[in-house]
Amino acid sequence: MDFSITEQQKSLRAEIIHFARQELNEGVVARDKEQVFSHAHWRHCAGTGILGFPVDQCYRGRQLDALSTAMALEALGYGCTDGGLVFSLCAHLLACVVPIWKHGNDEQKQKYLPGLCDGSLIGMHAMTEPVAGSDPFAMATRAEPEGNGWRINGTKTLISNGSVGDVAIVYALTNPQKGFHGGSTAFLIDRNTQGFSLGENFNKLGLRTSMLSELHFDNVSVPESAILGTVGGGSSIFTTAMDWERTLLGASLVGTMERLLETSIQRARKRFQFNQSIGKFQAISHKIADMKVQLEAARLLTYQSAWRLDHHKSASLDAAMTKLFVSESLVKSALDTVQIHGGYGYMTDYEVERALRDAIGSTLYSGTSEIQRNIIAQWLGI
Ligand SMILES: Cc1cc2nc3c(=O)[nH]c(=O)nc-3n(C[C@H](O)[C@H](O)[C@H](O)COP(=O)(O)OP(=O)(O)OC[C@H]3O[C@@H](n4cnc5c(N)ncnc54)[C@H](O)[C@@H]3O)c2cc1C
């Protein structure tokens, strides 16, 4: 594995950081307070190709390999201080666009990818249900054959981009006897389909500029052409979504960790107490040293997992390790950043408490830390 950065990747990184700082950060404190999703910022991101980083150019993507996508999302997480926007973009790209790009037939790719990449459509990925969170085997949403298609009934909850999304990948049981593996199917369902309605919009601790909602499917009729992949193949679509999301959303969090490290170093140098900079106190400098070690380890895990995605090797173990380590390191880094800033770190205008609030969700979404540990243990034969 060679992770030396090419000139192309270097200029991509510079481009994304410059774009994010210029275009995405203004007004984020107010948007976070009001819990506002910004369609204008979304459209700006579409202009840079963020919404379709790995997708082929013929579908209006930027055709980056997974490692370059990781570096570009890392740059986004570093340059953009709106954690909710970055999260929404990643959920759209990694759990909706990528599975369509990887598993969709030509007709589905033509229908959805150009719009998802150019910003005219927003994607969702709907797995979680009120009684089926960590345990997809408890899924209650059903799809039953109806004429030349399927009739879907059920409720999905905690769905990112729920109130603003246009198309959702929705998992339903097509063969309850077989359960999730072999008995679940992924459907592409448009927002305006009759019977598809929006439930509760959740208020959240963090990621407040990203919308999270409940979705209801009440006798929703879809044609056979709405099936993504194969009947009974839902678990393989889900694996693709999670391998990409756990790896590459992780990349954006690595970028955030780097930003928090720099913010902490600046504060440690500039803030004087007891006639010296606080960075001279070992209690502070050791926190910063630990942040640096965690950042570099997190980046290497992320790049390794992205490399495996590029080389078509199974990435599920690497993705779980990346997700677990990056999210827990991010939470720790964000907590330390608040501590290093003292009382000011607790104040909204310093924009450090928001990073902590945004970070906490990372140990929950895309499978909790406990579930990542279960997956890793399973791969180790335990
Ligand atoms: C910000 C955010 C965005 C999200 N976006 C989406 C989305 O776009 N699409 C989507 O489908 N879902 C989404 N989710 C839902 C997310 O995937 C679930 O919250 C997550 O899988 C956990 O399910 P749960 O909340 O029902 O918790 P539960 O499964 O009820 O878990 C509760 C606790 O029990 C632990 N636990 C459960 N089972 C085990 C076990 N076997 N071993 C050890 N511990 C266990 C969990 O780790 C957790 O600590 C999102 C969640 C958040 C917070």
Image (cartoon, rainbow, N blue to C red):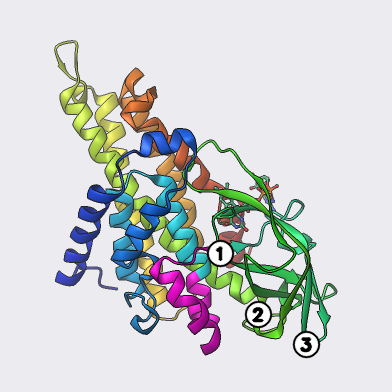
Question: Which mark is on residue 166?
Answer: 1
Local secondary structure at mark 3 = loop
Q: In the rendered image, which quarter is residue 159 located in? A: bottom right
The percent position of residue 308, horizontal first and vertical second, equals 40, 74
Image position of 367 with respect to 65: above or below: above
Image position of 318 with respect to 335: above or below: below
The percent position of residue 144, horizontal first and vertical second, equals 82, 76
Which residue is more in the foreground, 289 or 143? 143
* Quadrant the N terminus occupies: bottom left
Identity of the residue drawn at 39% across and 77% down: 55
Image position of 98 with respect to 272: above or below: below
Earlier-in-chain disc, 2 versus 3:
3
Which residue is more in the foreground, 233 or 109? 109
Q: Is residue 100 magenta?
A: yes
On screen, residue 291 versus residue 149, left or right, reads left
On screen, residue 239 versus residue 3, left or right, reads right
Q: Specify the segment rendered in magenta.
A: 97-124
Q: Is residue 174 magenta?
A: no
The percent position of residue 181, horizontal first and vertical second, equals 72, 74
Mark 2: which amino acid?
Answer: Ala
Earlier-in-chain disc, 1 versus 3:
3
**Crowd around label 1: few <14 · some 14–19 · many ≥20 (10 Å):** some
How far apart are the alpha carbons under marks 2 and 3?
11 Å
Mark 1: which amino acid?
Answer: Asp
Residue at which label 2 appears: 226
Question: Which mark is on residue 148?
Answer: 3
Earlier-in-chain disc, 2 versus 1:
1
**Crowd around label 3: few <14 · some 14–19 · many ≥20 (10 Å):** few
